[in-house]
Image (cartoon, rainbow, N blue to C red):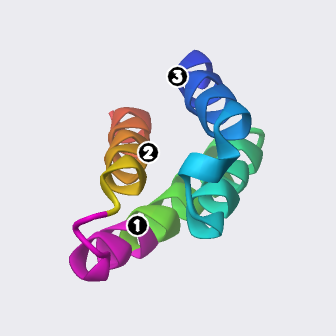
Amino acid sequence: MGNKIEEISDKVYYNMKKYSQLIIDLVEDIEDIMEFDELNKIEQLGAKSYEISGILEIINPKLQDDIKILNELLEIIKQQDK
């Protein structure tokens, strides 16, 4: 699973002009969380999942690149729960 977050991180890093600062920060946060021990990781990812879901409810639909990354991040978080 770490590989998937690295792929997203690379995509965002090399195309920063394409994404909002919010997306860049969230990707960095989730990368950091993946380093936590299992108990803290699950707790922190749950909090990020809630945050991302809230963002998806209010984000401008024209920001399709941001929305795609947010959905990919949510999928990574869901996979960690399994």
Q: Main secondary structure of the magenta part?
A: helix
- State yes or no: discs 3 and 2 in contact (Cβ < 8 Å): no
Q: Position of residue 58 (x, y in %)?
A: 27, 83
- Circle 3 residue: 4
**Residue 31 location (% of width, % of height):** 70, 42
**Residue pointed to by mark 2:** 73
Q: Is residue 80 visible to us here? A: yes
Cα separation, mark 3 vs mark 1, equals 17 Å
* Residues at marks 1 and 2, CA–CA distance in whole angstroms: 8 Å
Q: Is residue 57 magenta?
A: yes
Q: Residue at x 72, y 51 (%)?
A: 28
Q: Residue at x 77, y 39 (%)?
A: 35
Up/down of 77 relative to 8, above or below: below
Check disc 1 and report the residue beneath it: 52
> Would you place residue 12 above or below residue 18 in this image?
above
18 or 43: nearer the eye?
Answer: 18
The front one of 70 and 47 is 70
- Amino acid type, callout 2: Leu
Secondary structure beneath label 1 = helix
Q: Position of residue 67 (x, y in %)?
A: 33, 55
Q: Label 3: how many residues lie within 10 Å, few (<14), some (14-19) or many (20+)? A: few
Find residue 63 and report its image quarter: bottom left
User: At label 1, which amino acid type do we have?
Assistant: Ile
What's the magenta region? Answer: 51-62
- Say left or right for 62 vs 4: left
Q: Are marks 1 and 2 in contact (CB under 8 Å)?
A: yes
Q: Earlier in the sequence, mark 1 or mark 2?
A: 1
Question: In terms of secondary structure, where does tag 2 sit?
Answer: helix
Residue 82: quarter of image: top left
Q: Is residue 29 left or right of residue 43?
A: right
Q: Residues within 10 Å of mark 2 (few under 14, many from 20)?
A: many
- Place of residue 47 in the rendered image (x, y in percent of width and height, measured from the top left): 49, 70
